[in-house]
Amino acid sequence: MKISLFITCICDAMFPGVGEAMVRLLERQGVRVEFPEGQTCCGQPAFNSGYWDDARAAARTVLDAFEDSDFVIAPSGSCVYMFHHYRELFKDDPKRLEQAEQLAAKTYEFTQFLVQVLGVRDLGAYFPHKVTYHPSCHGSRLLGVKDEPLELLSAVRGLTFVPLPMAEDCCGFGGTFAVKMADISGAMVAEKAEHVTETEAEVLTGLDMGCLMNIGGHLRRKGANVRVMHLAELLAEGVERA
């Protein structure tokens, strides 16, 4: 099978280690991961801002890049769910609509793929730290990815899990929302960061680098000694320690 990595813009530009961690973990499971170089932004910023023609241009490139893939795996529930919006973008274009339906059906957030497709819950990781987890909005509410990351964390030896107070509250990032509504966004992330520090966790993890970048930035400005890691990075480090 052709299993492809969709890296997403933020990870590609700012957090490439997340993609590398995903590939290392998947290869340990016997999965060969390919990287179609034609991929680009999923089009979500333009879509959310009402520039649907620009979003369609990006979407066409993505559809073509992953047309031959059997599975597409991404480190972001937000970008994965954007593929479901392609149905709206191409509802009047039967050929592209069919491509959009196929892409949405074969694309998985990283932990979804591990647990639901591969049936893997224990990667053999060892991570002796106190960890809390932020469930990002798109992944948990729209994709329904709730149990998978917690199952993976529960199998990590040495890890002490601390529930995050008000975990379901948005961190305030929301892509363009953080730019357009900066004051509201800032208040939301301040509250989220306060809850993180309440846990006294050493590490904050999650599934979406947009959220983690936002929370982590606020924590650093406040001088909080909390390491922020994508779950793929945490698991990969844990596997290497084991």
Image (cartoon, rainbow, N blue to C red):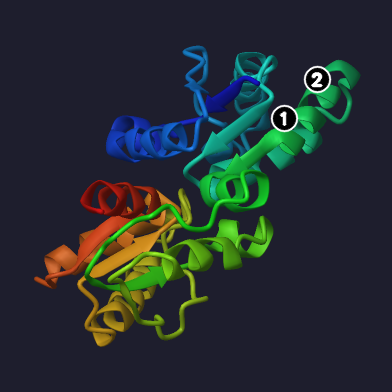
Instruction: Give SS at disc 2.
Output: helix
Residue at 52% in and 19% down: 39
Q: Is 161 or 17 nearer to us in this picture?
A: 161
Residue 136 coordinates in the image, percent (x, y): 50, 62
Q: Is residue 158 visible?
A: yes
CB within 8 Å, label 2 to label 1: no
Mark 1: few/some/many CA within 10 Å (<14, 14-19, 20+): many
Instruction: Give the residue type that dot 2 points to.
Output: Arg
Alpha carbon distance from label 2 to label 1: 10 Å
Q: How many marks?
A: 2
- Location of the C terminus (image quadrant): bottom left
| Residue of label 1 | 103
Above or below, 105 against 214 in this view is above
Above or below, 50 against 100 in this view is below
Residue 139 coordinates in the image, percent (x, y): 58, 57
Residue 180 coordinates in the image, percent (x, y): 43, 54
| Residue of label 2 | 96
Mark 2: few/some/many CA within 10 Å (<14, 14-19, 20+): some
Instruction: Give the residue type that dot 1 points to.
Output: Leu
Instruction: Give SS at disc 1.
Output: helix
Residue at 84% in and 26% down: 97
